[in-house]
């Protein structure tokens, strides 16, 4: 997913404010489901809750930059998923993070719905075609 950096994303010096990197990653994760027309934003379907974030701020993004957020499925478990996301400006990595997301239904941890598991496994196979043979 590509995002342009606007004035509202920056501090007084024109540098992206640190919490906005988390917003950009959240948007990219949501976009995965929007592209598949999946309905995970419904209380009856369930939703993900961020339980852990490990972030590395490598270089700043600045006003006017066009950045790209790349999302990788690291590990899919019964009720959670581990995701790595990286933000680039052209070929320069600006930010990387690993996130743990728990799946909830009725505000309790629950097995991830099969339709969502399929979205994640398909994405993982796109990223690593060798998984198709496993």
Image (cartoon, rainbow, N blue to C red):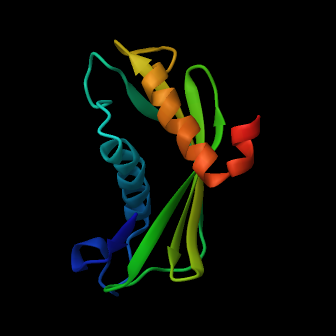
> Considering depth in this image, is 14 or 34 the residue closer to the camera?
34
Tell me if residue 110 can be seen: yes
Q: Is residue 107 above or below residue 23?
A: above
Q: Position of residue 42 (x, y in %)?
A: 25, 25
* Residue 28 lies in quadrant: bottom left
Q: Position of residue 11 (x, y in %)?
A: 32, 78
Q: Is residue 51 above or below residue 22?
A: above
In which quadrant will I find the N terminus? bottom left
> Considering depth in this image, is 65 or 15 the residue closer to the camera?
65
Q: Going by the image, does 113 lie left or right of 53?
A: left
Tell me if residue 51 can be seen: no
* Residue 68 lies in quadrant: bottom left
> Considering depth in this image, is 57 or 36 the residue closer to the camera?
36
Q: Is residue 103 above or below residue 14?
A: above
Q: Residue at x 44, y 80 (%)?
A: 61
Q: Residue at x 51, y 30 (%)?
A: 118
* Residue 92 lies in quadrant: bottom right
Q: Position of residue 73 (x, y in %)?
A: 60, 44
In which quadrant will I find the C terminus? top right
């Amino acid at each position: 997913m590509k995002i342009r950096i606007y004035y509202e994303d920056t501090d007084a010096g024109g540098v992206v404010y640190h919490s906005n990197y988390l917003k950009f990653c959240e948007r990219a994760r949501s976009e995965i489901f929007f592209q598949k027309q999946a309905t995970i934003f419904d209380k009856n379907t369930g939703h993900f809750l961020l339980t852990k974030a490990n972030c590395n701020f490598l270089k700043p993004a600045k006003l006017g930059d066009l950045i790209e957020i790349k999302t990788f499925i690291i590990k899919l478990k019964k009720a959670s998923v581990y995701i790595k996301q990286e933000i680039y400006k052209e070929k320069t990595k600006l930010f990387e993070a690993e996130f743990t997301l728990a799946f909830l239904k009725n505000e309790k941890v629950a097995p991830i719905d099969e339709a969502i598991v399929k979205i994640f496994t398909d994405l993982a196979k796109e990223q690593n075609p060798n998984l198709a043979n496993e």
